[in-house]
Image: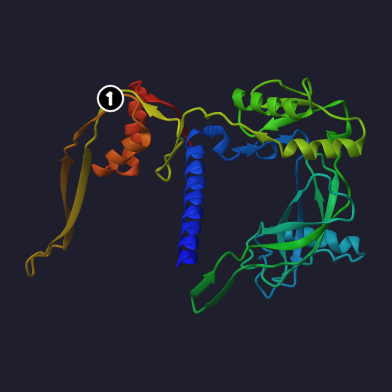
């Protein structure tokens, strides 16, 4: 019995110790600073990039061959015949004068690609091919060697290969069935880089970091984070979108330096209040900083209904008249009353939108209401219409 009492007392002691530890951790979670408990908001690489280190668009005009009768109608697309003639002449084949090429197995296409930064000659990049004529489908076609040029007119890549078209279609007897898009395709690793684009990475004593958005607080936070890690004077915020950083002289040291500062944490400040309205789709997007002043909102709907009924006037027998068809139009206007909603000062816009939705306001109604609140000076945010 004594052994059982001793084991029971030992278990109780361990239980009291565990409870004390749990209570201590819970208490620490209450008094521990919120900044320490919060997760890192962002890193430098997620809100900034090195100026001048970017991709470059490439484009070229080429021909897709080997189509199963779904190519361009050459009588309506003369540039397809001109491209074919020029390609054959480069291969030593000259068409007789007056010969009209009527081939439905070729299509003129626009070839586009993105040349990534630091791409070197010999590397492969993906290309996108899209028809510029009246080809019905590019499925099963092969792109002939096409030079891709940059904005300066220089050739930076050469594209060629078989297309991958993510679609299918069939037509017969005037009926047509199509799945996805057939006049565009893609060639994975279909272009070979022929020339590299120089970047400012290894030039000068400083590099500029461009922020993704114009914000002075964010630029100051990025410069402060870099200076705390690499020493005072390493970085300076030039404006709300540019941070200038002093970098080492050696190329390999410069790469290692940028790799380190890209992963530095940045304490972000609250963004400026903004409401984005899409008038085409009725979409409304707002951030957490949007607030309202004291205001009252009322909005009613006006519906106009027009119905047309055809009327036929038939003349009597042997009257010599003709049947006349007229229309009778009925127009009705219905106006629904709008309730007056009072909003207290400092209310969050999310609560306002929720209240207006409860009254039956549609997204199109909210577009008009928010613009009216802004015009009244009660919306503490910038409205951007896209």
Q: What secondary structure is marked by label 1?
A: strand
The residue at the point 64 percent across, 26 percent down is 221
Front in this rendered view, residue 221 or 145: 221
Give the image location of residue 154, x and y in percent: 85, 44
The residue at the point 33 percent across, 27 percent down is 373
> Taking 18 as reference, is 374 above or below it?
above
Does 360 sit left or right of 247 as displayed? left
Give the image location of residue 273, x and y in percent: 47, 29
> Taking 358 as reference, is 184 above or below it?
below
Total numbered labels? 1
Give the image location of residue 342, x and y in percent: 23, 29
Does 70 sit left or right of 337 as displayed? right
The residue at the point 49 percent across, 45 percent down is 20
The residue at the point 48 percent across, 38 percent down is 27
Front in this rendered view, residue 121 or 334: 121
Q: Which residue is mark 1?
A: 295
The structure's colour scheme is: rainbow
- Quadrant of residue 355 in the image? top left
């Amino acid at each position: 019995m004594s052994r059982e009492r001793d084991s029971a007392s030992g278990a109780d002691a361990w239980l009291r110790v565990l409870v004390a530890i749990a209570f201590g951790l819970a208490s620490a979670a209450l008094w521990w600073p919120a900044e320490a408990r919060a997760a890192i908001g962002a890193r430098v690489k997620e809100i900034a990039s090195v100026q001048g280190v970017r991709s470059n668009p490439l484009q070229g005009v080429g021909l897709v061959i080997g189509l199963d009768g779904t190519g361009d109608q050459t009588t309506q697309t003369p540039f397809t015949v001109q491209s074919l003639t020029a390609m054959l002449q480069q291969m030593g084949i000259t068409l007789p004068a007056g010969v009209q090429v009527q081939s439905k197995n070729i299509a003129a296409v626009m070839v586009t690609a993105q040349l990534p930064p630091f791409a070197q000659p010999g590397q492969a990049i993906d290309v996108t091919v899209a028809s510029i004529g009246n080809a019905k489908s590019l499925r099963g076609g092969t792109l002939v060697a096409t030079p891709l040029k940059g904005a300066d007119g220089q050739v930076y890549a050469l594209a060629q290969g078989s297309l991958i078209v993510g679609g299918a279609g069939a037509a017969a007897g005037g009926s047509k069935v199509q799945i996805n898009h057939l006049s565009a395709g893609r060639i994975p690793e279909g272009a070979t880089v022929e020339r590299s684009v120089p970047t400012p990475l290894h030039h000068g004593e400083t590099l500029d970091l461009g922020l993704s958005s114009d914000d002075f607080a964010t630029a100051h936070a990025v410069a402060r984070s870099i200076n705390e890690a690499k020493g005072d004077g390493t970085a300076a915020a030039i404006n709300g979108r540019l941070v200038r950083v002093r970098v080492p002289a050696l190329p390999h040291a410069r790469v290692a330096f940028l790799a380190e500062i890209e992963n530095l944490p940045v304490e972000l400040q609250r963004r400026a209040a903004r409401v984005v309205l899409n008038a085409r789709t009725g979409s409304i997007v707002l951030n957490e900083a949007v607030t309202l002043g004291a205001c009252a909102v009322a909005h009613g709907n006006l519906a106009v209904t027009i119905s047309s009924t055809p009327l036929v006037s038939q003349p009597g027998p042997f009257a010599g008249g003709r049947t006349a068809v007229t229309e009778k139009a009925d127009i009705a206007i219905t106006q629904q009353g709008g309730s007056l909603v009072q909003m207290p000062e400092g209310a969050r816009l999310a609560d306002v939108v929720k209240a207006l939705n409860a009254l039956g306001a549609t997204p199109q109604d909210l577009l008009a209401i928010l613009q009216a609140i802004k015009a009244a000076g009660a919306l503490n945010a910038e409205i951007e219409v896209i």
